Structure formats: structure tokens, C-alpha cells
Amino acid sequence: MKKIFHCTLIIILIISCEKQVSINQKYSDFQIDLTDLEKRNLYGKVQEYTLYITHFNESGKPQAENPKLINKEIFTEFGSIQFLEDYDINGEIKRSEAYFYDKNNKLTKTITKIGPTTSVDLFKRDSINKTETRRLFVNDIEMVKDIRIYGKNDKIIKEIEIRAVNGDTVVRNYNYKFDSNNNIIRYDFDTNNIDKKNTREYKYDENGNMIQKIYYDAKNIRKINSEYKNNILTKIKEYKVSSDSTETLAYIKEYDKDYNVTSINVFKDSKLYRETKIEYVFDKFGNWIEKKTYTKRNYRGSNSFHLATLATRKIKYWE
């Protein structure tokens, strides 16, 4: 069954799982068996990492004497997130999350603390009826009960959200269309209290790589085209589409062979607005331990890049 969902009224978490897969599989809206390490583009048996960032002004001088502690994440031996902390500008904890699993390594509980607020999510699966249930408690008061129902190919087909505070019930229905290779080519969902459907359309190349996504939302249409070399994602171009089908380039993003972003060009009114290039230093496992981000502010008439941030990661591995 699809990996359990996790969303709260306070925060949105990214939940994932355990083993390493190819780059084109990582770049997929429907890849459901990725681990938390893979979702973070981490290789090997990472036990924990700590992230620090130094910001620089345009003259090249650091804005602070010491690097800022940003966050810390700890992982289980089977590759799932176990604990994380995010820090504020003063290095104080602003959010913490703890994750708990059963003997089959399935998520059963999370505890999130943000200031005086503690939220607890409880998860339960029913493999026979293909359902997942989540109950959210905030400071010991039940706030939400979610039920997800799954159908063909373990894709969600219905979600029922019951809000305990006011008794409102939100129902979302999901529909899919598949091609002959079992790839999703259309996906839409509607909500009982919203008139307009949200629709996604997808195209693939002969190797099954997703080469185009089109998002149809209430107010916007976005088109994302992807390019590959030897089945490895190398470039993404995103366009905004107007009501008369005019496409306006929004950004171009390029990747290295290990799915690390190497450049981002942002456009405004079809003109190059800002350029970003990124350089990495890697450890022996292929994980970056240093990342330098350079920017060129084209909108200011700048002709050169300057160092904007230096990020470093201290990574520990399970032996």
C-alpha cells in the first residue's frame, strides 16, 4: 500500500522511506517507495547531518562572524527520518519533530513542537480495506481525522477529512488515466466545497521518463518540460500559460548526474531576471559537504556573479 501520508494544520512535512534508486525514478510525481534519504538526495547509510550556512554581501564579506546553524536531521538504520530540529537566526530551536515506527518500519506516530504548541499525529493502516487513517491532536485536543482510501495500483481514490473543532467534513475524489505502460497521463481531484477541479497531465519518452507536466489549477496553468541524457534528468524549463495559451518562460534549472542543482535562471516578463550557479564539494559517498551559491542580479544590470551563500554539512554514517 502507498506510503502513509502526513500533513498537519500547522506544518507540512515531507515523508519518505529507504533504498537508493535511479535519478529518473527520483524525479517522479508518483514514485512512492523512496526513502527519506532519497527524498533528500542523500547516498549511503546516513545516520545524521547538520547544516550550516554563511551569507555574504555583494562585496564578498560574510554577514556574520560564524556560520549559522540551520537544521539537524537524524535517520534510522532503515533510512527513515527519526528526529529533526530547525533553528532560528540566533541558533535556538524553533521546531522539532520526532518519528516513531512499528516493527515493520511503518510510521505510527509523530510529535511536533513549535514554541508552546505540541501536535501529535497517530497513523493506522488497514491493508485488507486498503485504507489509512490519521488523527491529529494539538495540545491534547483532537483537531482532524483523515481517512484515505486506495484503489488501482495503490493510488489514492478518496480522502475524507473530518474537522473535529467545527464538525466540517471535506471529501476529495481522485481520478487517474493510465497509458499502455501503466504510466499516469492524467490525474485530477475535486473537493466537495470547491467547484473547480485540479488537473495534472503528464507525457513520457520511450524510456518512461516524465518529459512534461501540465498543472491546471483554479487560477493558473503551469507547464514543466524535462530533458534527459542517458535517462538522467539534466534540465527543467517551467512556463506560465495564459488564458489565450501564450507561454511565458519562468525559469530554467539544470542538474548534474547525481540530481544536484547546478544552475537556476529566473525570468520575468520573458527577460532574464537573475542567474544562479552552484558548486559542490563531495565526500566519498557522493554527498555534498560544501555548496557555494553564486548569483548575478541581472535586473540590477549586474555583469558578474558574486558569492551569496556557503553551505556546509557535517554528515555521520551508520557503520
Image (cartoon, rainbow, N blue to C red):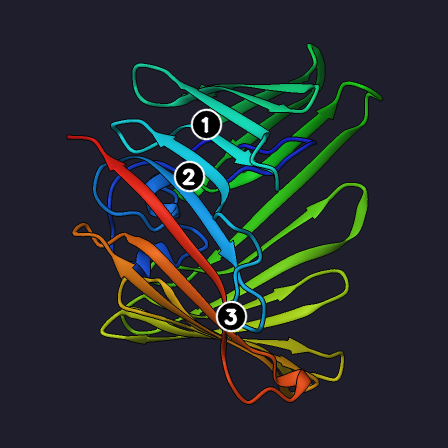
Which residue is at the far right? 166
Q: Between 162 and 6, which is closer to the camera in this rendering?
A: 6
Picture coordinates of residue 81 (x, y %)? Answer: 39, 31
User: Compared with residue 132, is residue 88 higher up or lower down, i.e. above or below?
Assistant: below
The kind of secondary structure element at disc 1 is: loop
Q: Amino acid at mark 2?
A: Asp
Question: Alpha-carbon neighbours of circle 3 within 10 Å: few (<14), some, or many (≥20)?
Answer: few
User: Compared with residue 120, is residue 76 higher up or lower down, i.e. above or below?
Assistant: below
Picture coordinates of residue 22 (x, y %)? Answer: 25, 56
Q: Which residue is mark 2?
A: 154
- Residue 141 disc label: none
Residue at 25% over, 41% down: 19
Residue at 30% over, 47% down: 42
Please tell me in which quadrant of the rendered image residue 272 appears: bottom right
Q: Between 284 and 181, which is closer to the camera in this rendering?
A: 284
Nearer the N terminus, badge 3 or badge 2?
Answer: 3
Q: Amino acid at mark 1?
A: Lys
Disc number lying in front (3 or 2) = 3
- Residue 60 disc label: 3
| Proximity of marks 1 and 2: CB atoms separated by less than 8 Å | yes
Q: Which residue is mark 1?
A: 130
Q: Amino acid at mark 3?
A: Gly
Q: Is residue 181 left or right of residue 306?
A: left
Quarter of the picture holding the N terminus: top left
Disc number lying in front (3 or 1) = 3
User: Compared with residue 12, is residue 215 higher up or lower down, i.e. above or below?
Assistant: below
